[in-house]
Image (tube, rainbow, N blue to C red):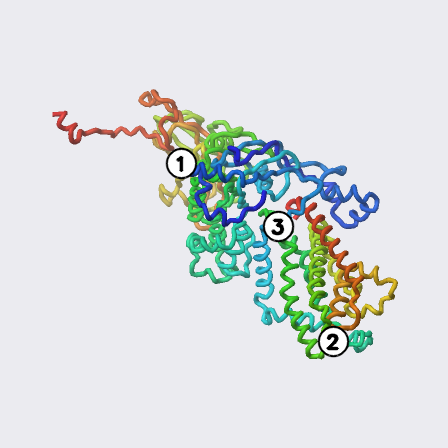
């Protein structure tokens, strides 16, 4: 069954009232072809993605995102300023530890802006997928009581994180101005592409972990490690140039490597756009996204039983 | 569109107990098995079935029924009988293991009041959030907003965060949102079990309104009165199966009297748990005339209910209540020992028989259930249980014998002798 918008019900409030009155019974028969019967059956082996149904529930997604944002900053003194503090503070720490003490090279740009350009997409990715991986468990009360497309739940933190991302991105642009760095003109095309890749990757990893998490609570302990390992496997604290050239494509299997390196090269204008790497990362991001959605859909039928 | 709103054919839902769940519970096992047989293993986890070992538990087994558009179906049964599982399968929260169901029309399910309410949000925000979770869209909620708030009676607090609400306000607001959901097929589980009596009355009223609007409703409840009032049909579930399907009254009767016979007297021991180490119920009997206890009483004679109890300590006040239910599950009456004076409630250790006499015709012909409750006023209820014993009131009056039992409705059956008739208007003239 597709989910009809509740508004349709509103327009003809008495359409659902069967009565002996002939007018209303005529209306009912006219309506009939539009209404599909919902069939409830044991799970098939190959799930459909249910994109159309998901789209009809976008209103719920918006509400969940709005709720998360609202609740996240409720009773905090600094409120949305946390979206700025997090990456900026990490930038300061990275600058001191990696830039000053460890003297990590930074492709000729000042280390603070070098790390911030990577931290903005990285912070989005790590909070979005960590949030998504926990989302099903924290929403167990919804899953066991109400029907709606379950994908809405891991998508909410992925979409919600974009608000913080936009705020942090503006700070990044201001920093560029302060350091008098002019981004490459390719940024206009590339940044949206990289952002899409970043969102798909977060959603894909989030779906995988969320679905696994509800069955195997071990995932809860794995996620913090995964965030840490993934950070070191991505060019956040160090430049791509320190990775030996022959390992680069393998390295680009990590979709965030292409995203972060792309952010850096176009925003800081540090060199030629690493197209093969970006395409490769985008590809692995899409693979993660599609497989994540499928795995999620194929396991979601048991969520209510194990939540 | 067919004539049926819901058609269920052989619905079943099984859970695997023990071994199998443990087997897959940790990632280590998953990885170990995945290395050995990657595809087979993943598939078995996904399907939650196939794979060896584990005891199968059928929460729902071979349940079939058809429900026409506009029918209001009650579902009754003991805890664990599969009622809630059935509703969960029909609302697509969980998948059936066997069988299939076809549902026509938009489904709205209400398995819990206040699902998705967030304590940090205001009443207003929660109305919108909860509404959207239940499947209403924004413009619809906006249109109904004032109505919802008014129904809940929380106008003054609508912009306060709900964590500051009293539990009553919280429940009222949550129910109010849910009550304004207007799907074609409504699935409701036991939401009336919450809140005070006043609120429950309001809920039953609202449910009646929904049912009266020609919507198809599936309704699970332990409140037999609500079932007979709201539903025109009911099914009885027992250990996952449908054991009765018929009119709501018949179903309630079948459920309540399943395995019940009319009994004249019941004795209780400590194991029955009626009371504690301070006071215990020992016996309940129905007596009429001078003989022993009887399971059938004559409607034309008074009869009495006796409740024997033993007190082990001294009570300044210990009140004994008699509760009568009809076979259809409605309350018939409640009466208490204290009505006869405070002297009877002051209790020293020892055995007592509390006896109350019911006048002839107090109850109509039919089957009734006796319940007994003990009360230390304002302190606690040492015991309290409805439906301890069932007895029958028999119609013996020759004046009423020309009609079958059940011809005269209602729980009371007094032979009212004070009928009179006086002529009015034209009849007066004719009489002259």
Labels 2 and 3: the sequence-earlier one: 3
In the rendered image, the quadrant that contains the C terminus of chain B is top left
Chain ID, mark 1: A
Label 3: chain? Answer: A
Horizontal and vertical percent position of residue B106: 53, 43
Q: Against A129, is A116 above or below?
A: below
**Residue drawn at x 77%, y 76% as measured from the top left:** A109
Q: Can residue A144 be seen?
A: yes
Query: Closest to the observer: A65 or B352?
Result: A65
Q: Is residue A148 left or right of residue A22?
A: right
Q: Does residue A168 sit above or below A299 in this rendering?
A: below
Q: Nearer the viewer, mark 2 or mark 3?
A: 3
User: Which residue is label 3 attached to?
Assistant: A54
Q: Which of the marked residues, 3 or 1, is nearer the chain's N terminus?
A: 1
Of residues B171 and B375, the one nearer the viewer is B171
Secondary structure under the numbered disc 3 in the rendered image: helix
Whole-number angstrom distance, CA of label 3 to CA of label 1: 37 Å
**Residue sticking out furthest to the left:** B432
Task: Give the image quarter of residue B95.
Answer: top right
Which residue bears the numbered disc 1?
Answer: A21
Mark 2: give few (<14), some (14-19) or many (20+) Cα within 10 Å: many
Q: Label 2 belongs to which residue? A: A112
Cα separation between marks 2 and 3:
41 Å
Helix, strand or loop status at disc 2: helix
């Amino acid at each position: 069954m597709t989910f009809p918008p509740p508004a349709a019900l509103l327009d003809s409030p008495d359409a659902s009232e069967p009565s002996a009155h002939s007018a209303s019974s005529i209306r009912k028969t006219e309506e009939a072809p539009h209404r599909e019967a919902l069939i409830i059956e044991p799970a098939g082996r190959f799930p459909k993605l249910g994109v159309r149904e998901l789209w009809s529930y976008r209103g719920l997604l918006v509400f969940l995102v709005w709720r998360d944002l609202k609740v996240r900053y409720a009773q905090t003194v600094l409120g949305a300023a946390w979206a700025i503090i997090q990456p900026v503070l990490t930038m300061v720490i990275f600058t001191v530890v990696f830039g000053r003490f460890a003297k990590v090279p930074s492709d000729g740009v000042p280390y603070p802006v070098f790390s911030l350009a990577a931290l903005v997409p990285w912070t989005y990715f790590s909070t979005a997928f960590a949030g998504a991986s926990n989302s099903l468990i924290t929403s167990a009360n919804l899953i066991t009581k109400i029907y709606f497309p379950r994908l809405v739940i891991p998508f909410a933190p992925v979409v919600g994180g974009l608000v913080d991302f936009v705020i942090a991105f503006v700070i990044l642009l201001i920093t560029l101005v302060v350091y008098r760095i002019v981004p490459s003109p390719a940024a206009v095309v590339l940044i949206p592409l990289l952002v899409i890749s970043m969102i798909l990757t977060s959603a894909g990893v989030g779906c995988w972990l969320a679905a696994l998490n509800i069955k195997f609570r071990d995932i809860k302990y794995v996620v913090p490690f995964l965030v840490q390992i993934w950070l070191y496997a991505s060019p956040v604290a160090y430049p791509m140039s320190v990775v030996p050239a022959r390992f680069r494509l393998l390295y680009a299997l990590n979709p965030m490597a292409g995203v972060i390196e792309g952010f850096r090269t176009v925003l800081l204008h540090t060199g030629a756009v690493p197209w093969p790497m970006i395409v490769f990362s985008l590809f692995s991001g899409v693979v993660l996204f599609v497989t994540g959605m499928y795995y999620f859909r194929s396991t979601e039928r048991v969520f209510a039983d194990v939540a | 569109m067919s004539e049926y709103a819901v058609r269920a054919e052989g619905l079943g839902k099984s859970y695997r107990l023990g071994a199998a769940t443990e087997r897959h519970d940790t990632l280590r096992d998953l990885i170990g098995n995945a290395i050995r047989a990657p595809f087979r293993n993943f598939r078995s986890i996904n399907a939650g079935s196939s794979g060896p070992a584990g005891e199968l538990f059928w929460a729902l087994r071979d349940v079939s029924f058809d429900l026409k558009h506009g029918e209001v179906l009650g579902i009754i049964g003991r805890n664990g009988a599969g009622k809630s599982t059935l509703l969960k399968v029909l609302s697509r929260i969980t998948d059936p293991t066997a069988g299939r169901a076809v549902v026509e029309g938009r489904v709205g399910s209400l398995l819990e009041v206040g699902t998705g309410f967030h304590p940090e949000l205001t009443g207003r925000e929660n109305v919108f959030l909860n509404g959207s979770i239940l499947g209403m869209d924004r413009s619809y909620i906006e249109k109904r907003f004032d109505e919802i708030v008014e129904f809940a009676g929380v106008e003054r607090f609508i912009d306060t965060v709900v964590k500051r609400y009293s539990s009553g306000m919280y429940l009222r607001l949550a129910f109010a949102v849910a009550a304004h959901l207007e799907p074609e097929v409504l699935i409701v589980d036991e939401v009336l079990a919450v809140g005070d009596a006043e609120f429950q009355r309001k809920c039953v009223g609202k449910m009646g309104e929904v049912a009266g609007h020609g919507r198809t409703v599936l309704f699970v409840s332990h409140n037999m009165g609500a079932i007979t009032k709201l539903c025109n049909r009911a099914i009885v579930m027992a250990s996952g199966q449908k054991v009765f399907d018929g009119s709501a009254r018949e179903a309630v009767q079948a459920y309540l009297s399943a395995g019940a016979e009319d009994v004249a007297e019941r004795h209780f021991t400590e194991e029955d748990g009626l009371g504690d180490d301070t006071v215990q119920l020992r016996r309940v009997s129905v007596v009429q005339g001078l003989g022993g206890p009887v399971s059938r009483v004559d409607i034309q004679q008074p009869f009495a209910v006796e409740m024997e109890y033993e007190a082990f300590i001294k009570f300044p006040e210990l009140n004994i209540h008699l509760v009568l239910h009809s076979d259809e599950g409605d309350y018939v009456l409640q009466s208490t020992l204290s009505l006869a004076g405070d002297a009877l409630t002051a209790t020293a250790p020892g055995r007592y028989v509390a006896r109350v006499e019911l006048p002839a015709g107090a109850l109509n012909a039919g089957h009734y259930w006796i319940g007994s409750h003990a009360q230390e006023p304002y302190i606690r209820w040492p015991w309290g249980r409805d439906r301890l014993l069932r007895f029958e009131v028999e119609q013996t009056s020759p004046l009423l014998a020309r009609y079958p039992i059940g011809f005269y409705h209602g729980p009371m059956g007094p032979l009212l002798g004070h009928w009179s008739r006086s002529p009015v208007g034209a009849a007066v003239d004719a009489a002259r």
